[in-house]
Amino acid sequence: MQIFALGINHHTAPLAVREQVAFDPMRLPLALHDLLRAKPVREAAILSTCNRTELYCATERPEAAADWLAEYHSLSPREIQPYLYTHPKRDAVKHMFRVASGLDSMVLGEPQILGQMKQAARTAEEAGTLGTVLNKLFQNTFSVAKEVRSTTAIGANIVSMAAASVHLSARIFENLADQKVLFIGAGEMIELCAAHFAGEKPARLTIANRTIERAEALAERFSGDAMRLDEVGERLADYDVVVSCTASPLPIIGLGMVERALKVRRHRPMVMVDLAVPRDIEAEIGKLDDVFLYTLDDLGQIVEDGLESRQAAVVEAEAIIDDRVGNFLHWMDSREAVPTIRALRDSAERARRHEVEHALKMLHRGDDPAQVLEALSRGLTNKLLHGPTHALNQAEGTERGELSQLISRIFRLHPGE
């Protein structure tokens, strides 16, 4: 059984493709069960974020998982094949370590991905699809990410997606303290964005969510107010900045809704930031003259300035990861010997029981205990050495020499000394 990581991310696919293979978080357990039931996959976990969808599998046929990914999302394999990557064994382990450490993120070193990977592991564990191998791999992944973040400067001066949203808004509005900001959604990304915008002390901060209680709880943290999701259309004109990130499979904000809002605003500009996959804001809105629409791909462009200062940390992080990859692969390789070790112990146990039973019978009939112990030890010795002795006697030519060296190594012998 081999480990494979396969999927698409912001490096290989544009947002329009990524959103087609995104998973609804509420349906992930069912998807995992479907993957294991429909294909020759023995263990599986799915990571689905704004920037990537990845399957981590223990299987001998990674192409089966790739076909399942396309089939699950009602796509033909050729539609996603150009964007798909598959990492076997060593590359899969290294890839997961790099992803968790923030080395493969749109924002180098961003910490959010680690929490997302932990959630992917929890979901798989609760669904019963996280077996021994993947569980061990995830635990090693989290340990490596912690080591990288605590011993290198990879997390220093991070420009997160949340901070990038503020940065882009500040390009349009000279003073964010005069602006009203609307957040659509109440998840982790919105929470991070709200924290960053709250630091600018905007004139108003509002959270809109399908569940009003969650919106109110989050708004209270930042001295804001809340509204229901179905109120957004009629109140959109009140806001200068709109940041959206929900799990909705369909857009929340449509072209007509924004056009009506702009008329009420008398064409005062609006900044709209769409952090969702699939997108919450219809792409056509970006063509309106008075709207500055930014997507995840746009946000990635503004973080390049900080990359050079973090390159030295990347070198250190890669060295740590390479070393830990070797450790994990050694653990995997050692597992391959487990059946042989178990069979060897079972064979020895059978020989032990047989000789003990024979010795007990001798004692029961009154034989000398010393002679019984001698017979017991001799019988065990003969049984345990019969296999290697027979194999050595039967071997010929170079095989005999190789076998002789192997037996000497196993039993720590020093012939000729």
Image (cartoon, grey):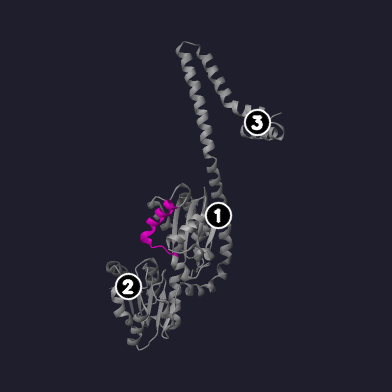
**Magenta stretch?**
21-38
Disc 1 marks which amino acid? Pro
Q: Which mark is residue 380?
A: none
Let me know if residue 59 appears in the view: yes
Name the residue at the top extreme.
366
Give the structural element (helix, strand or loop) at label 1.
Answer: strand
N-terminal of the pair, mark 1 or mark 2, is 1
Task: Residue 167: name its quadrant.
Answer: bottom left
Q: At 33% from the left edge and 84% from the top edge, which residue is drawn?
A: 260
Horizontally, residue 275 falls left or right of residue 206, namely right
In the image, 191 versus 36, the foreground residue is: 36
- Are dots 3 and 2 in contact, CB under 8 Å? no
For label 3, count other residues whose C-alpha is less than 10 Å away and answer few (under 14), some (14-19) or many (20+): few
Examine the residues drawn in magenta and state their main secondary structure.
helix
Give the residue pinned by disc 2: 207
Image coordinates for residue 307, horizontal then vertical, percent: 55, 70
Q: Is residue 37 magenta?
A: yes
Camera-near label (3 vs 1) is 1
In the image, 284 versus 242, the foreground residue is: 284
Horizontally, residue 324 falls left or right of residue 121, namely right
Give the structural element (helix, strand or loop) at label 2.
Answer: strand
Is 331 located above or below residue 27 in the figure? above
Q: At 66% from the left edge and 28% from the top edge, which residue is drawn?
A: 394
Disc 3 marks which amino acid? Leu
What is the CA distance from the residue labelled 3 to the residue labelled 2?
74 Å
In the image, 106 versus 282, the foreground residue is: 282
Image coordinates for residue 204, horizontal then vertical, percent: 33, 78
What is the CA distance from the residue labelled 3 to the residue labelled 1?
39 Å
Give the residue pinned by disc 1: 88
Image coordinates for residue 68, horizontal then vertical, percent: 46, 57
Q: Which mark is residue 413?
A: 3
